Image (cartoon, rainbow, N blue to C red):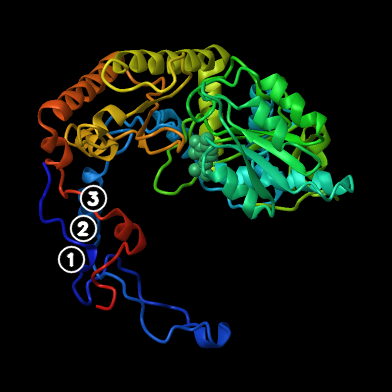
Amino acid sequence: MHNQDQKLIFEVSTPGRVGYSLPEMDVPEADVAALLPEGYLREEEPLLPEVSELDIMRHYTSLSRRNHGVDSGFYPLGSCTMKYNPKINENVARYNGFAHIHPLQDESSVQGALELLYDLQQHLKEITGMDEVTLQPAAGAHGEWTGLMMIRAYHEANGDLKRTKVIVPDSAHGTNPASATVAGLETVTVKSNEDGLVDLEDLRRVVGEDTAALMLTNPNTLGLFEENIVEIAEIVHEAGGKVYYDGANLNAVLSKARPGDMGFDVVHLNLHKTFTGPHGGGGPGSGPVGVKADLIPFLPRPVIAKRGDEYVLDYDRPQSIGRVKPYYGNFGINVRAYTYIRSMGPDGLKAVTEYAVLNANYMMRRLAEYYDLPFDRHCKHEFVLSGRRQKKLGVRTLDIAKRLLDFGFHPPTIYFPLNVEECIMIEPTETESKETLDSFIDIMIQIAKEAEENPEIVQEAPHTTVVGRLDETTAARKPVLRYQNA
Ligand SMILES: *Cc1c(COP(=O)(O)O)cnc(C)c1O
């Protein structure tokens, strides 16, 4: 299947070859040097591959065949919600009226686009139980930061300047403490108890007059529902803090429960996860943020509002934290999410949650015989296993993940959350058939048996991929080793 000698695009490059043909210029050439400030002009030509259109099409088609995506195979990446991206979303996002409008067009000429965004806000308010929503943030982490900046602005507006701490559980997604830091706040950790839930005693210990907010995912990153959530919210509210819901993965509560009803003041959603936007590879995403009434004045501006029959961009928001993204956020992803919500309807969204949770529990129970189950209780949309039994046999969780590649599966999330040894975090999503779930389970069982009988085959995996094990640190730090100075 694979062409073993995949070349780099720079190796295909031939001096002078071009992938375009433009007509002769019939206007005077611009004097670029006169247009750009001194110091911004290149001294040398950039190093770009010189290829024909056919070369480049073949190059990317060949690369895409080596890639693993939701459209090519099962992708049970816990906490990432790699669910199927319905193709109707793509059709709608490509309508000329959406795809070809210019972000600087006058409001009166983009009423349809604004109506869609406004309606999407209404749906997200209904889904989250919040009073207002902004669609500006471009990703989950960006939404977290936006929400925390609003909380900060709220405390500052109340003259409550000592509230500088954000409490996060030890199982939190890494973006939570990172966003707190970027928002100029400090992170304090609250411990999980032996059931994998927030330890209330520890929460009472860390909460106080300096608490700006508690950030929580519910169900948490272990896939477990924080059943004391109402009490948790009360503890934080009594201390004067706000409660932030990391709603990146809404698959376990969508249309069943609402963060707004659980006591949360702010929530961000990942439209590129729960609401079927394609993601991975860095974007584009959409991380809308919903807030309760007392935080509305601080929303990023402009706010998309409706005046009579007209949709407008409201800039008159004196307490706003300002703009967090140019134009309208990642409009195309918002169109896809809107299409998804409208095509599913309330019953469809309820079914999403039911199947997501059923699929996860089915897999968890079948795999629990072969892998350690650190928290033996019903899970929500995802669950964690521990590879510590296999580790005693000399097979690490990393080896298991690599072995899965031999069978065409994208591995689950591993070594996260950090509070579980040799963690394997599986999120099947609702869109996979029982046959797919079973074939993955069967391979996981086979790998558990290999770890006992023939550990080398797991330790040395993958065997069937184009490249074997990568030096992942170097690959991340120096993505291009050769041709840097060609
Ligand atoms: C994915 C995720 C995020 C971050 O979202 P990005 O869009 O990648 O920035 C935050 N929290 C949780 C729980 C997530 O799963």
Residue 352 x, y percent position in the rendering: 48, 17
Residue 279 x, y percent position in the rendering: 43, 40
Q: Residues within 10 Å of mark 1 (few under 14, many from 20)?
A: some
Question: Residue at left 82%, top 44%?
Answer: 154
Q: Nearer the viewer, residue 98 or 86?
A: 86
The answer to whether residue 202 is left or right of residue 339 is: right
- Does residue 330 appear in the picture of this structure? no
Q: Earlier in the sequence, mark 3 or mark 2?
A: 2
Q: Nearer the viewer, residue 32 or 8?
A: 8
Q: Identify the residue position indicated by label 1 in the image.
A: 12
Q: Amino acid at mark 2?
A: Leu
- The answer to which image quadrant residue 461 occupies is top left
Q: Residue 54: which numbered mark, if any? A: 2
Q: Is residue 188 above or below residue 475?
A: above
Query: Within 8 Å of ligand 1, the CB of disc 3?
Result: no
Q: Residues within 10 Å of mark 3 (few under 14, many from 20)?
A: some
**Secondary structure beneath label 2:** helix
Q: Nearer the viewer, mark 1 or mark 2?
A: 1
Q: Identify the residue position indicated by label 3 in the image.
A: 63
